[in-house]
Every structure is written in structure tokens, then in C-alpha cells.
Image: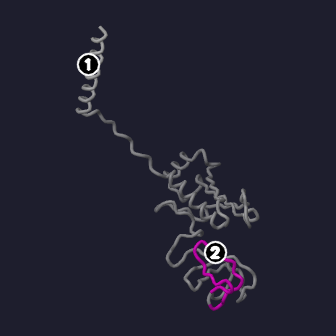
Amino acid sequence: MIGGDQRYARPGRELDVERVDQAKVGPSRPGAGHQLDDGCRVSGMATSHPHMTHTTRFRCCRDRRGQWGLMDGVRVSSRVVIPAGELRERFSRSSGPGGQGVNTTDSRVELSFDVAGSPSLPEELRERVLRRLSGRLVDGVLTVVASEHRAQLANREAARERLAAVLRTAMAPPPPKRRPTKPSRGAKERRLAAKKHRSEVKRARRRLED
């Protein structure tokens, strides 16, 4: 239990923690990961004091069911995973009509991925992506934007899904080449029969005019 909040951490969700129960979380040390009582692992502690009285931001990486979170990067396919270290995020204020907090917080997310310099892409797939996305890349870098949600975290998740979808489409293998075929015997016979019928119709019209 997190003191005062009564909420448990969930994968890909940020919580503002005012106080941490030492018996539940365990000893604190800089840079350490911690296990909450529902199996979620959180990171970001930077104090050795047994109880934190200042607000600290936590992010959960993965829960006991192994769900994919923000800290795991972007899964494009079963064989291509982009590590979080190769992604660059830039935050800014969202435009458009606001409500509370929309135009006062950096909720807009620009997610960039260096396609040309990434070691995570096989060479064949890299060349295919560079060729198909040449109009969208700037110096080999692909950038997607998400600003449709009020919360920054929701926009971060949307940007990752959007990046994965763009790369998945660009990496798709080309369709197989059409094998040249010849008209079948029946098709030839039907074509000749139609020509003959049309010729007879024209000949009949000519007789009426005469």
C-alpha cells in the first residue's frame, strides 16, 4: 500500500508518491528497483531515508503477468524490438481547445527513432524502411507525434503504438510477382463467339438499310 493514495502501480502508469511504507517497499538506495506488494517493480528511488516526505515520480516497468510497458521499448514484430534507449522523446504543450491542464502541461509527445543508425534493425529491413519512408525521414530519423490525449503518459503510449504501426507497414514484404498466364481455351472460344455474334448483328442491320 502506498501511503495516502491507496492505489497500486500498474505497468506504464505514473504515480505521485507522498510517502512509502518501508515494510511494504523495503530499504531505499539510490538507483535501486523496488517490489510493491502486488508484484509490480518500480524504479526511481534516490534517497536513503526510510520514509520519503517529498513527492517522487515512479514508473512501473512490468507486472507479474509480463505485460509490455514503456520501459521495454517498442515491439514491432516477433523478431524486431526497438529498445527504449534508441527512442528519443520531446514534450511540448498540446494545441487546440483545452480544459483544465491541457494547455498548461507538456502533454504533446514527439517520438523519434533513428532508422539509419539503429543496430536493432536487420540490414534488409533497414533498406526497405529507408526506401519506403524516404518522404517522411529527416536525416534517416522517423518522428511520430501524439497529442490527442490529455495525459502525457497516454500520448507516450499512443506514440509508441503509432511508431510500431508505421514501421510494421514499411517492413512488410512486397507482394509476390504475378505469374504471366495465357487465356484458357474456353476464354478464347467465348471471345470468338462474341465477335461472331456481333458481326452477325451488324450484317443484319445492313440488310435492313438496303
Residue at 65%, 88% in the rendered image: 27
Are there few (<14), some (14-19), or many (20+) residues within 10 Å of tag 1?
few
Q: At numbered mark 2, what does the secondary structure look like: helix, strand or loop?
A: strand
Q: Nearer the viewer, mark 2 or mark 1?
A: 1
Q: Earlier in the sequence, mark 2 or mark 1?
A: 2
State the image coordinates of residue 195 (x, y, percent, origin top left). Answer: 28, 23
Q: Nearer the viewer, residue 172 or 119?
A: 172
Quarter location, residue 188? top left
Asked whether 132 or 119 is in front, the reply is: 132
Q: Residue furthest top?
A: 210
Q: Circle 1 is placed at which residue position?
A: 200
Amino acid residing under circle 1:
Glu
Residue 189 position in % (x across, y down)? 23, 29
Q: Does the magenta stretch include residue 83?
A: no
Q: Is residue 5 above or below residue 190?
A: below
The chief SS type of the magenta part is loop
Viewport quadrant of the C terminus: top left
Q: Which mark is residue 59?
A: 2
* Range of magenta residues: 1-23
